[in-house]
Image: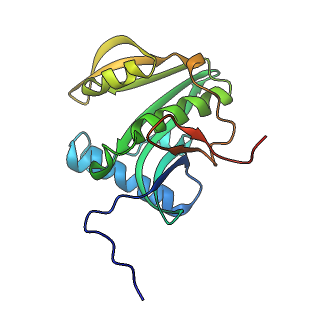
Amino acid sequence: MYCDLPAVFVPSEYRVKQATQRWEFAQAYGLRREVFCVEQRVFESDDRDEIDTHARLLVALACVGGTPDQVVGTVRIHEASPGVWWGSRLAVHRAFRRHVGLGTTLIHLAVGTARAHGCDTFFAHVQKQNAELFKRLHWNWLADEMLCDRPHCLMSAEVDWYAPCHDPEWGLAAGVTAPVALGVPA
């Protein structure tokens, strides 16, 4: 017996969480290569750098029948100095960019996770075409910059606007409305 899925299949649920499984890391790094090396040609063959050795990797997972099946988005975060965090390498698979705010939910989890770990300042270099999204999510423009020959904006999050996420391994459910915390009820 098999299931005939429609030609254009849309997962019924997405989970956005900190990567914990080997396959999640592998697919997240593969997605970053696809977006930043192949699609955008920001990097030649790989976008990984020394930050990856200590960054927390967050992933958006498409679920089939309630089971995580594929990494469709990712971002990394790291603490640069006490209380100062950075987000970088936000990527969403081309086929999922219009699905239920995956990028927005990754941003919520990124800042929320950092906030739960003592973040009082959160920065990101945002590609200029994405700055409006970040402004809607309570980020402030600080400066225009050129990185990798592309226009970027140095931006900072209004950290207090984001709820702390103490359980990033559980993460958030991405839905049509606001992100919802997952995990054991208090």
* Above or below for 33 versus 82: below
For the rendered model, the colour scheme is rainbow
Please give the count of numbered marks on the rendered protein.
0
Picture quarter with the C terminus: top right
Picture coordinates of residue 6 (x, y %)?
29, 69
* Above or below for 83 versus 103: above
Picture coordinates of residue 158 (x, y %)?
52, 16
Q: Quadrant of residue 162?
A: top right
Q: What residue is at 57 percent from the left and 41 percent from the top? A: 54
21 to the left or right of 63: right
Q: Residue furthest bottom?
A: 1
43 to the left or right of 69: left
Q: Which is more toward the observer, 78 or 184?
A: 184
Q: What residue is at 26 percent from the left and 63 percent from the top? A: 8
Picture coordinates of residue 17 (x, y %)?
56, 47
Picture coordinates of residue 47 (x, y %)?
35, 45
Q: Which is more toward the observer, 166 or 175?
A: 175
Q: Quadrant of residue 136?
A: top left
122 to the left or right of 96: right
* Above or below for 51 versus 122: below
Q: Residue furthest right?
A: 186
Q: What residue is at 64 percent from the left and 48 percent from the top? A: 170
